[in-house]
Image (cartoon, rainbow, N blue to C red):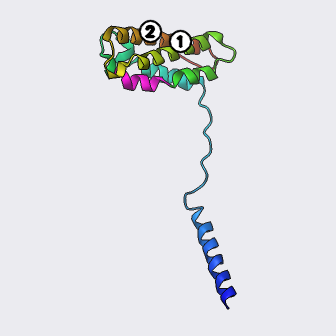
Amino acid sequence: MRTRACVVLLTTAVLALTGCSREAGPSPKGSPDPGPGALATKIRALQADDCHRAPTEVRAPSCEKFVTQLSNVPGTARKYAADHPRLAEAAERLDSTVRAYRNNDCAGGGDADVCAATLTDMASALSDVHTELSTLPDVTG
């Protein structure tokens, strides 16, 4: 009798756990890479920011959100740079300016002149990435 009760309890527990494992829905699947055109669109949006358009006129700490949004652009650009060494170089320059912004504590109010120069270099590097990215097939604008 005890054995039967244990089997019933174990079976009930297993069935309950099995039922719970599907409540969250299907397993997420990776979305396809949107391609270099999507990155070009993101860059155009970032280029509308004052931190890009007028890097010497804004206070560097107010550009932290811009820099954060910009920080994944170099890595993404490198994915598309396999046969495009100038795109890879531009992505590296952009990555270097993002590191310089952070290393110079520009978000925390670092030296204003150094940070303005870093933002100017960053704007130039972002434009270079966009220019090189625009030479790839399937990228417009």
Most foreground residue, 68 or 40? 68
The image quarter containing residue 102 is: top left
Q: Residues within 10 Å of mark 1 (few under 14, many from 20)?
A: many
The image quarter containing residue 111 is: top left
Q: Position of residue 35 (x, y in %)?
A: 60, 27
For the point 64% across and 86% down, the residue is 5
Q: Residues within 10 Å of mark 2 (few under 14, many from 20)?
A: many
Q: Left or right? Give the position of 27 relative to 53.
A: right
Disc 1 residue type?
Arg
For the point 58% across and 11% down, the residue is 132
Most foreground residue, 120 or 27? 120
Q: Main secondary structure of the magenta part?
A: helix
Q: Earlier in the sequence, mark 2 or mark 1?
A: 1
Q: In this orientation, does residue 55 appear? A: no
Q: Which residue is mark 2?
A: 121
Q: Position of residue 80 (x, y in %)?
A: 63, 21
Q: Position of residue 86 (x, y in %)?
A: 61, 9
Residue 16 falls within the magenta-colored stretch:
no
For the point 46% across and 18% down, the residue is 98
The local secondary structure at tag 2 comes to: helix
Magenta stretch bounds: 62-71
Q: Position of residue 100 (x, y in %)?
A: 45, 15
Q: Which residue is mark 1?
A: 93
Most foreground residue, 49 or 21? 21
Q: Left or right? Give the position of 20 relative to 51.
A: right
Q: In this orientation, does residue 85 appear? A: yes
Give the Cα distance between marks 2 and 1.
9 Å
